[in-house]
Amino acid sequence: MKDIRTVSSRVVYENPWLSVREDAIERADGSPGIYSVVDKGNYAVVVPYENDGFWLVEQYRYPMGERSWEFPMGTYPDRRTGDPLELARRELLEETGLSAGRWDLLGELWCVPGFSSQAGHVYLATELIHGELDREHEEQDMRHGWFSRADVEKMLRDGTIKDAQSIACYGFFLLHGK
């Protein structure tokens, strides 16, 4: 038997970006419980690297009430699934106007596995080619900029970069010997 068995499941809320379900569960010892799960489409994060620095995007994160510097990332629209590398290419172009001649998978992440099924792929993008932005309407407040590696490390230390996905992606970058 699995550690936890799903007895029943019902969607309690959904919109084009996510659904929330409540599952009645049975633990391995037979005791009952409930689990609330946020289902979102999987995402891709891009670490765009050139000239010993990174391209980051900054946008307002409504739930936090603050602007946030992050690596470019996103999901397919309407919670659909697809090729994670295709998604990474799309997000990089959309948010920064960049495309890449080389893509390396750095790793995979679970966003918040305590309550969400969302997972992501992290790619290093190099041999960058500059082009035109193609942002979605929701990204109209977004900015992007290049930061030296020293600047990014300072932003990580001083709390300017707080996004957990971006912090984890920088760790992947370091583990791959860059």
Image (spheres, rainbow, N blue to C red):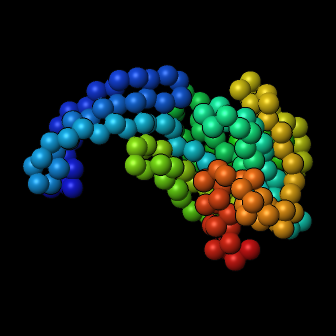
Q: Is residue 79 visible?
A: yes
Q: Residue at x 15, y 42 (%)?
A: 32
Q: Left or right: where does residue 127 sit relative to residue 69?
A: right
- Quarter holding residue 94: top right
Residue 6 percent location from the top left of the image: 21, 41
Q: Which quarter of the rendered picture does the C terminus lie within?
A: bottom right
- Quarter holding residue 107: bottom right
Q: Residue at x 65, y 59 (%)?
A: 167
Of residue 131 and residue 175, the one placed in the foreground of this image is 175
Of residue 112 and residue 73, the one placed in the foreground of this image is 112
Of residue 152 and residue 65, the one placed in the foreground of this image is 65
Residue 109, compared with residue 98, is above or below; it is below
Q: Left or right: where does residue 41 sit relative to residue 151?
A: left
Residue 109, compared with residue 172, is above or below; it is above
Q: Which quarter of the rendered picture does the N terminus lie within?
A: bottom left
Q: Residue at x 65, y 50 (%)?
A: 163
Q: Is residue 102 visible?
A: no
Q: Residue furthest bottom?
A: 177
Q: Residue furthest left?
A: 30
Residue 152 percent location from the top left of the image: 79, 61
Residue 161 percent location from the top left of the image: 72, 53
